[in-house]
Image (cartoon, coloured by chain):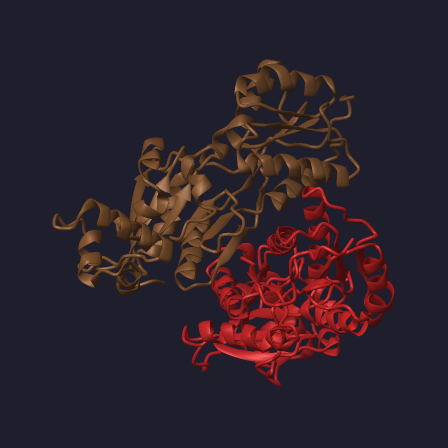
Chain colours: A red, B brown
C-alpha cells in the first residue's frame, strides 16, 4: 500500500502538498490536485482520514431494494454491518446511480471520500463501473459478478451450479422427467450462470435441455405468454424458474389457466426471498443465505485489506421444501 | 450446534452419562459410549474440552512435505498458524495416514480428540476420508478438493481456470501458437481442473488442444520419454506443465536433447515452489500464494464456526515472469 511519501516522491512535490491536494485545499492548483489523485490511484494509495475514529467502507446498492425487511438486499446489508461495525469499521450505504459512475471513476471516488474498500450489490453487466474493475486498485467485493485477473477484486455469491443441481435432482427425485426452465434476462452474470447450469445438469442426468423446455426473456410477460404455454404443451410436469418473483408470476398464471399447483404442475423458485413463505401454495426454492452473504463479503474485504487476494467466495446453496412441488401425478402424460 | 443436553435427551440418559461417555470413563458401557458418539456426530455436537485454554484445530497433512522452508506445504501451514494462533486457537499439525482413516471416521476422530474443525492438505481423490465429506458434520476445510452439497465443508485453492488462462495468454503474447501441455496424474482434482482449463482456454483462443499437443501420465518418465518427443515433433514452441517439478524435469530433458531454453523452446511451470528461482534458467510460472492460502483457510474455518457456510474460496492466481519463456524464435517451424 503506497503512502503520502510515495506519492510526493513520484511527483517531486512535498508531502504537505500531497496531503493538501487530497484534502481539497484551496491553495493547491487544480492541475496538481488532478496529478496527485491520479498518482494515488496508480500507486494504490488509500487514505485513512486523520480524525476519523475508524476506517470507512462504502456499501453501494444498485438496482436492488434494501430498506425494508422484505427486500432481498435488507439482510445482505444487515449481515455486512453486523460483521463490520463491531470490528471498528464505519459502513456508509450508498445508492449508486449511473450518473455517479459517469461522473467519477471508482478508484477516484473511493480515495476522494476516504473509503478503504467497497462492497457492491446488484451491478448488471452494463453498469459503467463494471469495466473498471479489471484494473481498479481499491479493494472491491462484488456480489454476483465475476472479474478475472485483478487481485484487488473479489466475487462473492451462492454456488449457482450447486443450487441448480440440487433443484434438478430434487425434481427428479419426485419423478419429474420433463423439467422446464424459465429465466429472466440473460444479460446478467447470475441468470446466465443458472441457465447454463440447468442445461449442463439436465444433460448430465440424461434429460432433455433444449428449446422445447427452456425459455428466457427480459420481460416477465413474454415468459408467461410465449414461453410458458410452449413448455406446458411440450409436456413439462415441473418448471424451475431463475428467481422467485418469476416463479410466483408463473404460479399465478398456471392457476389462472386452471392448473393446480403442485397436483398438475410443480413450480420451483430460486433465492428464497421473504415472499416465498406467503405465496399460495408456499414456494419451494433454493435459498441464498442473505445474512451469511453479507458477513462473508466483510470477511473477504478484510482479507483484501490484509493482502490475501481472494478471487471467488461462494456460499453453499440450500434447498427449502415448501408446498409448490409434488410427485408427478399419474394422469399427466 | 447441539449440546450435551440434546444428546442426553435424544438417548434418554443423563447429561452426566453423556459427558462421562465422551470422556471415556470406565463406568460407562462400551455400547453406551458408542451410542453417545454416534448421536453426537449425527446431531453435530462438538466438544470444547473443559480445561483447555482455547479451541483446538486439527491441520492434517497428507502426501505433502511441510517441515522445511523449501517444501510446498511449509508456508501454507505457517500462514494458517499465523492467522489462527493469535486468534486464540491451538493448531495441531497431524500427518494423516491411510491407516488412521481406516481406523476411525473423520467426525469420530474430531469429536474424540476435541477438535472444533479441520484443515486438510493434500488429499488425493482416493483417500478414504474423502467420501465421508459429503455427509460429515464437523467443519472441514479442504485444500484443492471440491465437495458439493455439504454446508460443513469448504473447498479452498487457487483459481486454476484463471491461472491457466493467464499462462496461455502470456505464451500467446510471446507469439506462441502451438502450445503443448504436459500433466501429472489426472486422478487428482486439481490436475484435472488445470488440464480441462487448458483445453478450454486454447479452444476459446482459436488454438489447437488435442492429443497432438497434450499428454498426461502418473509417471514423470512417461511424460518425458513418450509425450514430450511427440509434442516437440508436432512443432510445439512452448510447453506448459501442470506443476513446477514436472516443468523442471522437462527443462532438463530438453537441455539434454540439445535444445536451448528459452531460445528454442519455452517452458512454463505452475505453483511457484521455492525451487523455481534456482533452476537454470529460473522458471516462469503461475504462483499459488501459499501463505495467503493458509490464512484464507483459517478465515473459511472461522466462518464455518460462525455458521456462514462458505462452499468455495479461490485465491487469485499470479503470473511470475522469470527466464524460461521467450518470444518465438524465427527459425522454429
Q: Is residue A229 found left or right of B280 in the rendered image?
A: right
Residue at point 60%, 69% (across, down): A272
Count of marks, rendered view? 0
Image spot of residue B216 (x, y percent):
60, 25
Judging depth in this view, the residue of B275 and A23 nearest the camera is B275
Residue at point 31%, 40% (across, down): B94
Judging depth in this view, the residue of A106 and A295 nearest the camera is A295
Quadrant in the picture for residue A17: bottom right
Q: Identify the residue at the far bottom of this view.
A: A26
Quadrant in the picture for residue B215: top right
Is B241 rendered above or below residue B35?
above
Image spot of residue A142 (x, y percent):
61, 64
Q: Identify the residue at the far right of this view.
A: A226
Residue at point 55%, 80% (across, down): A92
Residue B294 in view, yes or no: no
Q: Is residue A40 found left or right of A292 in the rendered image?
A: right
Image spot of residue A140 (x, y percent):
59, 65
Residue B246 in view, yes or no: yes
For the C terminus of chain B, the quadrant is top right
Quadrant in the picture for residue A24: bottom right
Is A201 rendered above or below residue A126?
above
Image spot of residue B66 (x, y percent):
36, 37
Judging depth in this view, the residue of B232 and B28 nearest the camera is B28
Q: Identify the residue at the far front of this view.
A: A331
Is A60 rendered above or below residue A132?
below
For the N terminus of chain B, the quadrant is bottom left
Amino acid at each position: 500500500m503506497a503512502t503520502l511519501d510515495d506519492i510526493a516522491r513520484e511527483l517531486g512535490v512535498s508531502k504537505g502538498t500531497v496531503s493538501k491536494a487530497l484534502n481539497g485545499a484551496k491553495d493547491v492548483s487544480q492541475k496538481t490536485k488532478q496529478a496527485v489523485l491520479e498518482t494515488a490511484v496508480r500507486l494504490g494509495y488509500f487514505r485513512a482520514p486523520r480524525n476519523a475514529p475508524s476506517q470507512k467502507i462504502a456499501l453501494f446498492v444498485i438496482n436492488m431494494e434494501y430498506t425494508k425487511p422484505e427486500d432481498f438486499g435488507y439482510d445482505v446489508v444487515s449481515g455486512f454491518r453486523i460483521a463490520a461495525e463491531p470490528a471498528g469499521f464505519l459502513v456508509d450505504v450508498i445508492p449508486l446511480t449511473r450518473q455517479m459512475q459517469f461522473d467519477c471513476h471508482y478508484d477516484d471516488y473511493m480515495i476522494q471520500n476516504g473509503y478503504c474498500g467497497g462492497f457492491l450489490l446488484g451491478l448488471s453487466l452494463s453498469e459503467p463501473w463494471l469495466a473498471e474493475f479489471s484494473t481498479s486498485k481499491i479493494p472491491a467485493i462484488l456480489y454476483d459478478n465475476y472479474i478475472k485477473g485483478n487481485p484487488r477484486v473479489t466475487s462473492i455469491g451462492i454456488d449457482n451450479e450447486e443450487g441448480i443441481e440440487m433443484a434438478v435432482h430434487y425434481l427428479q427425485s419426485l419423478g419429474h422427467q420433463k423439467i422446464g426452465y424459465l429465466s429472466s434476462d440473460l444479460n446478467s452474470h447470475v441468470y446466465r450462470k443458472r441457465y447454463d447450469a440447468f442445461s449442463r445438469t439436465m444433460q448430465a442426468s440424461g434429460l432433455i435441455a433444449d428449446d422445447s423446455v427452456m425459455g428466457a426473456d427480459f420481460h416477465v410477460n413474454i415468459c408467461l405468454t410465449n414461453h410458458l404455454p410452449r413448455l406446458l404443451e411440450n409436456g413439462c410436469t415441473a418448471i424451475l424458474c431463475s428467481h422467485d418473483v418469476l416463479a410466483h408470476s408463473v404460479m399465478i398464471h398456471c392457476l389462472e389457466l386452471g392448473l393446480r399447483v403442485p397436483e398438475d404442475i410443480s413450480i420451483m423458485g430460486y433465492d428464497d426471498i421473504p415472499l416465498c413463505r406467503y405465496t399460495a401454495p408456499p414456494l419451494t426454492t433454493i435459498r441464498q443465505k442473505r445474512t451469511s452473504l453479507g458477513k462473508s463479503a466483510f470477511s473477504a474485504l478484510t482479507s483484501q485489506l490484509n493482502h490475501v487476494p481472494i478471487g471467488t467466495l461462494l456460499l453453499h446453496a440450500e434447498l427449502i421444501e415448501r408446498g409448490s412441488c409434488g410427485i408427478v401425478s399419474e394422469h399427466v402424460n
